[in-house]
Image (spheres, helix red, strand yellow):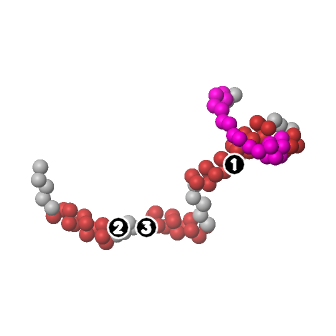
């Protein structure tokens, strides 16, 4: 069993409180349980959506080909590396 050692408080209007109480009653749970279940479900959905990248099938194939293909560094990066090699180090 998970230890519940944190507390959150929220201020709501009387109308919102009535609506939440009715919804909780209709689902057979307490208002606290109703709010927590809904909040956790929504939070999980939001976090999962931001942690994963969803690609269409053709985009997925292009992505894999790009990963497997030859590395082509930008021309500016190659030029910068060549300039850096010509510099003398002074220690």
Question: Could you tell me which secondary element the residue under label 1 belongs to?
Answer: helix
- Residue in the image at 64% along x and 51% along y: 46
Q: Which numbered marker is on residue 42?
A: 1
The residue at which mark 2 appears reads as 73
**Horizontal and vertical percent for residue 78?**
28, 68
Nearer to us in this view, 55 or 22: 22
User: Where 6 falls versus 55 (above or below)?
Assistant: above
Question: Could you tell me which secondary element the residue under label 3 belongs to?
Answer: loop
Nearer to us in this view, 43 or 83: 43
**For marks 2 and 1 on the same chain, the one whose residue lies earlier in the sequence:** 1
Residue 39: in magenta span: no
Question: Could you tell me which secondary element the residue under label 2 belongs to?
Answer: loop
**Quarter occupied by residue 50:** bottom right
Query: CA–CA distance between discs 2 and 3?
Result: 12 Å
**Quarter occupied by residue 32:** top right
Which region shows up in magenta? 3-21
* Disc 1 and disc 3 in contact, CB within 8 angstroms: no
The residue at which mark 3 appears reads as 69
- Residue in the image at 81% along x and 35% along y: 30
Nearer to us in this view, 76 or 43: 43
* Disc 2 and disc 1 in contact, CB within 8 angstroms: no
- Residue in the image at 51% along x and 65% along y: 63
Q: Name the residue at the bottom extreme.
A: 75
- Mark 1 vs mark 3: give the one in front: 1
**Quarter occupied by residue 10:** top right
The residue carrying pointer 2 sits among few (fewer than 14), some (14 to 19) or many (20 or more) residues within 10 Å by Cα, namely few
* Disc 2 and disc 3 in contact, CB within 8 angstroms: no
Going by the image, does 33 lie left or right of 72? right
User: Where 6 falls versus 78 (above or below)?
Assistant: above
Query: CA–CA distance between discs 1 and 3?
Result: 39 Å
Q: Name the residue at the front extreme.
A: 14
Going by the image, does 84 lie left or right of 6? left
């Amino acid at each position: 069993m998970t230890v519940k050692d944190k507390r959150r408080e929220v201020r709501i209007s009387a109308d919102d409180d009535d609506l939440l109480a009715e919804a909780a009653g209709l689902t057979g749970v307490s208002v606290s349980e109703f709010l927590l279940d809904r909040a956790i479900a929504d939070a999980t959905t939001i976090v999962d959506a931001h942690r994963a990248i969803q690609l269409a099938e053709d985009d997925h194939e292009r992505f894999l080909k790009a990963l497997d293909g030859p590395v082509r560094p930008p021309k500016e990066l190659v030029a910068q590396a060549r300039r850096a090699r010509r510099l003398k180090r002074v220690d």
